[in-house]
Image (cartoon, helix red, strand yellow):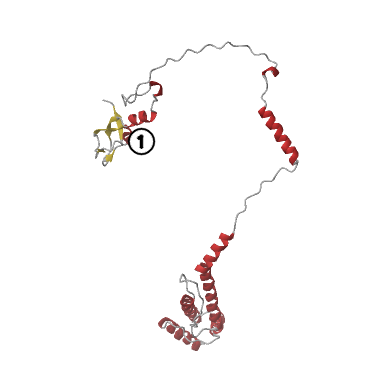
Amino acid sequence: MDQFYQELRKIQKKERNNAILARVDEDFYTTIHEFLDGLRQEAIRDPFSNIHGMLKEAQRIATEICERREHKITDAAVVNIQRSYHLFTGKPKFDLIDTTPLNLTPEEEKFYFSLIDTLKNHREGISLEKLSDDEKERSKKVIKPKETQANTLISKPEQEKGSGLNKISKEKPVKKEQISVAEPKVTPTPKPEAKKVPKKNIEDNPNAFDEQDEVYDFESAKLAKDTELVTMLVFDEINAIVGVDEKIYGPFRPQDLVTLPLINAKVFFKNRKGRLVKI
């Protein structure tokens, strides 16, 4: 029993100092379980012996050996798949390079090739070939428009007949004689004749216009109101701004009285950076 414990210590040292797997027997993990079970049974038989300390230390050493070997096997699988399966370099190609780690136990060999299969499937899912095939499949799908279902309850001649009746009813207005209620006769009031305004000769005066064609420009009136200059009391320190009239105003300091267009002043009022002052 002490001999296998010393063997575990040697394997632990090799796993720490070397990048490759230490050489172990094929039944290495089975032997570990048998060794630990023997220590447990002996600890049960003699609760006051030093076997408890050896059991705890053997469990720690065996766990470290297993974890270090797992890391080495995983790293080898990743490096191998990266060398064998090319990504984003044209058509992907899988050519597994035989760099299987040495000194694998049967359990570790099964673990290694399961990692290779998982990494290979992952690379196939993200390869350019897979993505291009999916894009081609999506492009082949054509959405067909839904056909409008005709009303099969009414035959086509009846539909044409009905449409003809509707057409006739629209074309023939109802005569006034068919209305039973008598309408009172209203004598139309003669409209006053519009006073003719002599048109001005545009050739003689280019600025002349017809008074009847004059239109009120609401947009110009609104623009004139927004560009109207107002006086404002500034509350905070603000950098210079460009007004709607393309002039530079500011910079501003607290308690400054400034004059600027109304549309720019509204921004100050809305953000509570100033207030209107009537002078």
**Element class at badge 1:** helix
Quarter residue 228 falls in: top left
Residue at x-position 38% and y-position 30%: 219
| Residue to which mark 1 is pinned | 270
Residue 274 higher or lower than 140, as above or below: above
Report x, y in % for residue 40. Answer: 55, 80
Identify which residue is drawn at 55% across, 75% down: 117
Where's the C terminus, which quadrant? top left
| Residue in front for this viewpoint, 163 or 194 | 194
Kind of residue sitting beneath label 1: Lys
Residue 264 in view, yes or no: yes
The front one of 5 and 188 is 188
Name the spot of residue 124 as percent of width and height, x first: 53, 70
How many residues crowd around disc 1 within 10 Å: few (fewer than 14), some, or many (20 or more)?
few
Q: Position of residue 185 (x, y in %)?
A: 62, 11
Q: Nearer the viewer, residue 68 or 272?
A: 272
Relative to 134, 71 lies left or right = left
| 42 displayed left or right of 271 | right
Query: Which one is nearer the viewer's eye here, 255 or 229?
Result: 229
- Rendered location of residue 126, percent (x, y): 51, 67
Q: How many marks?
A: 1
The residue shown at (48%, 84%) is: 8
Tell me: residue 190, above or below residue 121.
Answer: above
